[in-house]
Image: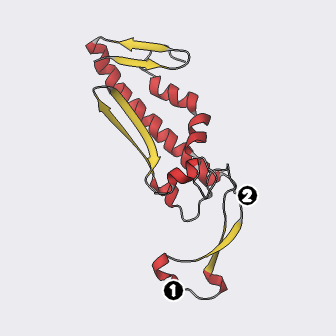
Amino acid sequence: MTLYYKDEDFELTIYDDRVLAVVEENGLKNMKKACILLRNKTVRLVKTSPASGRIYFRRRGRPEKRGEVKGIGDYIVHRASAPGEPPATDRGLLIMSCDWRVSKDEEGILGEAGSNVKYDDALEFGSVNMAPRPHWRPALNNNREKLVETIVKGLIPDYE
């Protein structure tokens, strides 16, 4: 097995099996920490970003119960996000669905963070009917240095 890491300023390749065993164990832990960090930063961004888009009303309650809803007090006011802003949370489905996973195969360690709601990609990248409301990419870009440090810490002596 070979460990290979490269970014703009640094490149490392390790071939020693004993070193690789330690690196692999620490690498899995560090990748898990980095994925959790990215997920948490994304959730925080969505939860705390002020929305400045249009205001609209929707009925209170679950969709299957909406037929029973009557009266003006049964509506909820929601301010959507404007194009380019992180999405404004409404029911909290997006932030509740944000998750991460780490896997290992013969090529290395892979860390992934994302959401399983259908509309996450449309929010992040936009669609035919909607401009992007990026949230994963800003969280990644704003925390890139901390993420790299988290992954590499303990794998490379004296990494700062």
In this view of the protein, which residue sits in the foreground, 23 or 142? 142
Q: Is residue 65 left or right of residue 60?
A: left
Give the CA distance from mark 2 to mark 1: 30 Å
For residue 157, say whether it is visible. Answer: no
Q: Position of residue 15 (x, y in %)?
A: 31, 11
Residue at 59% across / 55% down in the picture? Answer: 128
Q: Is residue 26 left or right of residue 143?
A: left
* Mark 1 burial class by Cα count in 10 Å: few <14, some 14-19, many 20+: few
For residue 88, say whether it is visible. Answer: yes
Circle 1 residue:
67
* Mark 2 burial class by Cα count in 10 Å: few <14, some 14-19, many 20+: few
Circle 2 residue:
52
In this view of the protein, which residue sits in the foreground, 67 or 89? 67
Q: Position of residue 126 (x, y in %)?
A: 59, 51
The quadrant the C terminus occupies is: top right
Picture mark count: 2
Where residue 140 sits, quadrant-wise, is: top right
- Sequence-wise, the earlier of marks 2 and 1 is 2
The image shows residue 74, relative to residue 45, as above or below, that is: below
In this view of the protein, which residue sits in the foreground, 57 or 157? 57
In this view of the protein, which residue sits in the foreground, 71 or 18? 71
The image shows residue 23, relative to residue 55, as above or below, that is: above
Q: Are marks 2 and 1 in contact (CB under 8 Å)?
A: no
- Mark 2 falls on what kind of element? loop
Q: Position of residue 118 (x, y in %)?
A: 46, 57
Q: Is residue 22 left or right of residue 128?
A: left
The image shows residue 1, relative to residue 118, as above or below, that is: above
Name which residue type carries label 1.
Answer: Gly
